[in-house]
Image (tube, rainbow, N blue to C red):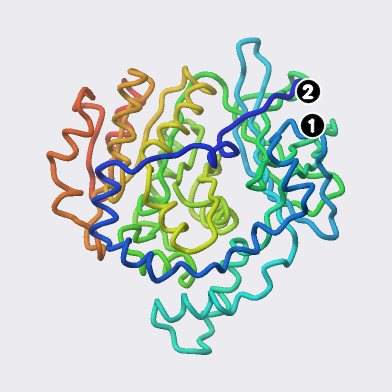
C-alpha cells in the first residue's frame, strides 16, 4: 500500500483566491463590507490555542516527524466521505481528509449566540438559541495541528496525517488488494480514536458523474444576504430547494447511479451540518468544503463570497485528475460564480463536461438580480461552450427530459 500527500483541502490556506468581478458584485449588492465591520469580535481566537511543539512542527506539514497520535479522551476527529478511483495501473485510490479538534475547548458560546440572535431578530431566551449554540460549536473548538489518526483501511491499520496548521490532514492512499468494484461502498472507522466514520464510494473510470453546488442550488442558504446566511446556517432547519431532491433521485436512476461530488465554498467546520442535510435529501457522495483560517465572523463571510471561481476550478481540476474519462454534469446557481466556474472548466477540458445546468435564483434579499440573471452574463460565462451544453432553469422539472436525452446521446 502506498501513501502520498494530497491537497484537495489541506493546502488551501496557502492559496489566495482573489475576488473577481462576480465576487465584487455579490459583496456590494449584499452590503457585506458594511456588515463585516460589525462582526470582527475575536470570538474564534480559541481555535488557535495549541502547544508550542504543535505550533512549531506544524510548519512541516504532512511530513512532520514530531506529530502526536490523537487521544480519544481529549481529541475528536472528523473523517470525510470520499470517492475511490483507479490509477493507471488499475489500483484503487482515494483522498482521505480528516479534521482534528480538541474536545469542548470552545465552551463559552454565549457571546456569539447573543450576537447571532440579535442580528436575526430573536428574543432573548428564544429556544432557537440552543440550535445556534450547537451549530456554532464546531467553529469554536480548538483545531489540532501536528496530529494523526489511524484508520482500518480494508483490514490494514493505516495512518492519516499529521495534520497541517489548520487542523486538517489529506492523504492519497492506495487500497490494499484489488477486490473492489464500481458503486461499492466501504465504511471506514478510526482505530482507538473518537472519530466519525466515513464512507468510500468506488467509481470506475467511465460512466456519468455529477458536480453539484450546495448553497442555493440544493439547499436554501440566501448567500446574497448576510442575515439570510446567519438564519439558514445557524437558526433554521436546513431546507432543500423545491424539486431538487426529486430531480437528483431521477438523475441517480436515469444515469445508473453516477458518482456525486458536492462542491461548496462553505467552510469545512460546517461539515456535520451539511453532511446531515445531504444525507436526508440527496444521494451519497463526496462533499468538498473550503478550508478556512479566520478568527472572526468577517472571515466567515469572506470565505463564502471571495475567490469562489478560482477555488471551485482548482477543486474541479483535482476531480478531473481522478476521473478524466467520466462524463460530468455540473449543476449550480446564479447567486455567485457557478456559471463562470463551469464555463472555465469546460474550456480547459473540452468534452469532459457533458451538461451544465444553472438555477436562476429570484427573490433573495441583497442579490443584484438584474445582473446575476442577465442573459448577457450567462453568454459571457459560457463563451466557447456550445449552447446545447448549458441551460438556465427556474423549475427543476425542466431538466428531466434533458437528463433523459443525455443517456441516449
Q: What is the spatial separation of the Cα atoms under label 1 and label 2, in whole angstroms? A: 7 Å
Q: Earlier in the sequence, mark 1 or mark 2?
A: 1
Position of residue 294 measured from the top left corner of the image (x, y, whole percent): 53, 55
Judge left or right: residue 272 versus residue 29. Answer: right
- Mark carried by residue 296: none
Residue 387 sits in quarter: top left
Which residue matches tag 1? 154
Q: Residue furthest top?
A: 89
Against 136, residue 357 (above or below) is above
User: Mark 2 packing: few (<14 Cα in 10 Å), some, or many (20+)?
Assistant: some
Position of residue 252 measured from the top left corner of the image (x, y, whole percent): 46, 38
Residue 64 sits in quarter: top right
Residue at x-position 72% and y-position 66%? 105
Residue at x-position 75% and y-position 39%? 162
Against 40, residue 87 (above or below) is above
Judge left or right: residue 97 versus residue 382. Answer: right
Q: Residue furthest bottom?
A: 124
Judge left or right: residue 383 versus residue 155. Answer: left
Position of residue 408 measured from the top left corner of the image (x, y, whole percent): 33, 22
Which residue matches tag 2? 176
**Nearest the eye: 51 or 172:** 51
Q: Quadrant of the C terminus?
A: top left
Please, what secondary structure does the residue beneath circle 2 have? Answer: loop
User: Mark 1 packing: few (<14 Cα in 10 Å), some, or many (20+)?
Assistant: some
Please, what secondary structure does the residue beneath circle 1 have? Answer: loop
Position of residue 383 measured from the top left corner of the image (x, y, whole percent): 20, 27
Q: How many marks?
A: 2
Judge left or right: residue 234 versus residue 19. Answer: right
Residue at x-position 45% and y-position 31%? 316
Against 16, residue 323 (above or below) is above
Does the CB distance between marks 1 and 2 fall below 8 Å? Answer: yes
Amino acid at each position: 500500500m502506498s501513501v502520498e500527500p494530497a491537497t484537495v483541502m489541506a493546502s488551501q490556506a496557502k492559496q489566495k483566491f482573489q475576488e473577481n468581478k462576480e465576487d465584487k458584485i455579490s459583496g456590494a449588492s449584499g452590503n457585506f463590507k458594511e456588515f463585516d465591520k460589525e462582526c470582527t469580535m475575536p470570538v474564534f481566537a480559541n481555535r488557535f490555542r495549541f502547544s508550542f511543539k504543535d505550533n512549531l512542527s506544524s510548519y512541516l506539514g504532512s511530513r512532520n516527524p514530531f506529530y502526536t497520535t490523537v487521544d480519544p479522551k481529549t481529541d475528536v476527529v472528523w473523517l470525510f466521505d470520499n470517492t475511490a478511483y483507479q490509477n493507471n495501473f488499475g489500483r484503487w485510490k482515494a483522498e482521505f481528509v480528516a479534521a482534528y479538534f480538541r474536545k469542548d475547548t470552545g465552551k463559552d458560546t454565549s457571546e456569539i449566540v447573543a450576537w447571532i440572535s440579535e442580528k436575526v431578530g430573536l428574543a432573548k431566551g428564544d429556544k432557537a438559541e440552543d440550535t445556534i449554540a450547537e451549530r456554532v460549536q464546531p467553529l469554536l473548538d480548538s483545531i489540532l495541528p501536528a496530529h494523526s489518526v489511524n484508520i482500518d483501511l480494508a483490514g490494514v491499520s493505516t495512518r492519516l496525517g499529521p495534520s497541517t496548521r489548520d487542523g486538517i490532514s489529506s492523504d492519497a492512499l492506495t487500497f490494499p488488494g484489488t477486490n473492489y468494484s464500481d458503486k461499492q461502498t466501504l465504511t471506514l472507522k478510526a482505530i482507538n480514536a473518537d472519530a466519525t466514520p466515513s464512507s468510500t464510494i468506488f467509481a470506475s473510470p467511465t460512466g456519468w458523474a455529477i458536480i453539484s453546488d450546495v448553497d442555493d442550488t440544493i439547499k436554501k442558504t440566501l448567500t446574497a444576504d448576510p442575515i439570510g446566511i446567519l438564519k439558514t446556517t445557524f437558526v433554521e432547519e436546513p431546507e432543500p430547494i423545491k424539486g431538487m431532491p426529486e430531480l437528483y433521485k431521477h438523475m441517480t436512476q436515469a444515469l445508473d447511479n453516477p458518482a456525486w461530488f458536492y462542491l461548496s465554498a462553505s467552510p469545512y467546520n460546517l461539515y456535520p451540518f451539511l453532511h446531515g442535510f445531504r444525507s436526508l435529501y440527496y444521494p451519497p457522495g463526496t462533499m468538498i468544503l473550503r478550508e478556512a483560517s479566520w478568527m472572526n465572523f468577517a472571515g466567515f463571510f469572506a470565505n463564502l463570497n471571495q475567490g469562489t471561481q478560482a477555488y471551485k476550478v482548482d477543486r474541479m481540476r483535482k476531480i478531473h485528475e481522478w476521473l478524466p474519462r467520466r462524463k460530468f454534469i455540473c449543476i449550480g446557481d446564479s447567486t455567485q460564480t457557478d456559471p463562470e466556474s463551469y464555463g472555465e472548466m469546460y474550456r480547459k477540458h473540452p468534452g469532459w463536461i457533458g451538461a451544465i445546468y444553472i438555477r436562476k435564483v429570484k427573490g433573495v434579499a441583497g442579490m443584484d438580480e438584474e445582473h446575476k440573471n442577465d442573459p448577457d452574463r450567462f453568454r459571457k460565462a459560457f463563451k466557447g461552450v456550445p449552447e446545447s451544453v448549458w441551460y438556465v432553469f427556474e423549475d427543476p422539472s425542466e431538466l428531466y427530459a434533458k437528463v433523459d436525452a443525455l443517456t441516449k446521446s
